[in-house]
Image (cartoon, rainbow, N blue to C red):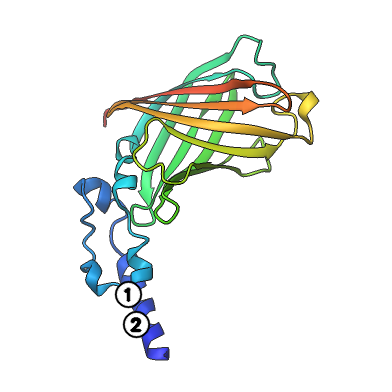
Amino acid sequence: MIGALQGSLCFIATALSFSSGALAQSGSAETGLPPQSEMPKWFSRGLPGPGHAVLAPLVGTWRVQMSFYGTLGRSPDQPPLVTEDLVSRRQWVAGGRYIEDTMEGTLNGSPVWRKGWLGFSTMDRRYEWVTIDPVNTTMMYFTGAPNSEGQTPITMSGVFTDQGVAGEETVGKSVGMRTVIRIENADRNVFELYFTRPGQKETLATRAIYTRLKE
């Protein structure tokens, strides 16, 4: 029993030593790991696959034009706040299982920072997206519908308890949220965030247009 456990731990350590970008760089499921027939089944079920490959065009460095509508305590009826002073850097982490997205820049002279992780759950067959920022103490967690692999655009939903980001009238209340990812081509993608306030229709909160920066 102990020997088997030690063998599994050694296998995991060896597997995790491979480059996290292997899947994205090869453009296939080839990761340099041993054949799946030689892997523990519980490990092989967690390997990156076609659902992750769909996300590959998002990796890279991006100039971001972001419009803030019904968020930052503002009404969705107000004109949006717009900034083009944002840069997003996305890279594969955890052996090609997640894309880590770090966005930095300014809005009206104030710093903007956000970090997120985007992945695909092989067991639930759905996309998942979690973000953190210096405005909220809540992790924003979105999940797609089960068995949504390959469906475009990628749509994921969640709920958060508002601190007033969606308006003073929703403080302490649950606000629905939905992220829509449109991968238009290898050099451009769009992220939209929608809020659904209690008893109201869904409204656009933010729209971010990503244009690839050539390296």
Q: Residue 18 location, x and y as percent?
A: 28, 62
User: Few, some or many C-alpha atoms within 10 Å of disc 2 (few <14, some 14-19, many ≥20)?
Assistant: few
Secondary element at image label 2: helix
In the rendered image of this protein, does residue 177 appear above or below residue 137?
Answer: above
Q: Are marks 1 and 2 in contact (CB under 8 Å)?
A: yes
Residue shown at 66% from the left, 10% from the top: 78
Q: Nearer the viewer, residue 46 or 78?
A: 46
Q: Residue 160, position in %: x, y?
A: 67, 39
Task: Name the quadrant containing residue 161.
Answer: top right
Q: CA distance from mark 1 to mark 2?
A: 6 Å
Q: Position of residue 75 (x, y in %)?
A: 69, 16
Residue at 70% x, 28% y is 165
| Residue holding disc 2 | 7
| Kind of residue indicated by mark 2 | Gly
The residue drawn where x is 79% and y is 36% is 172
Which numbered dot is residue 11?
A: 1
Mark 1 secondary-structure assignment: helix
Q: Is residue 2 above or below residue 19?
A: below
Q: Position of residue 89 (x, y in %)?
A: 40, 37
Dot 1 amino acid type:
Phe
- Quarter of the image for residue 210 reads top left
